[in-house]
Amino acid sequence: NLGAAAATPDILAQLAKLLADSNKDVRSSAAEALGKLGAAAATPDISAILVRLLRDSDAGRCQSAAYALENLGAAAATPDILAQLAKL
């Protein structure tokens, strides 16, 4: 676990960009890194990106978002995210 100290705005912005990358391996690595940041990474901006990715028709993007959410834990369990997960 990388912890809250690593969840800087710059790091989160870079990971957010990588979550939308066209390469599945890049998305997967970004989701893994995001999850390792823990609850500190469950910001409103990251949550909004993850909700958008959960709605994506690309299964790989949806899977990456779900993986990140799983590792962010309860801090990421916003009503919007829970609603999107219920639709999967």
Image: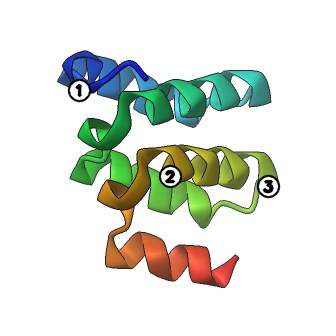
Is the C-beta separation of discs 3 and 2 under 8 Å? no
Q: Horizontal and vertical percent for residue 7?
A: 26, 24
Q: How is the image coloured?
A: rainbow
Q: CA distance from mark 3 to mark 2?
A: 15 Å
Tell which tag, 1 or 2, sits nearer the viewer. Answer: 1
- Determine whether the residue tagged by mark 2 lies in a helix, strand or loop: helix
**Which residue lies under the disc numbered 1?**
4
**Which residue lies under the disc numbered 3?**
59
The answer to which quarter of the image holds residue 21 is: top right
- Determine whether the residue tagged by mark 1 lies in a helix, strand or loop: helix
Mark nearer the N terminus (1 vs 3) = 1
Of 85 and 54, the residue lying toward us: 85
Q: Is residue 62 above or below residue 4?
A: below
Mark nearer the N terminus (3 vs 2) = 3
Q: Horizontal and vertical percent for residue 16?
A: 42, 33
Q: Is residue 63 above or below residue 79?
A: above
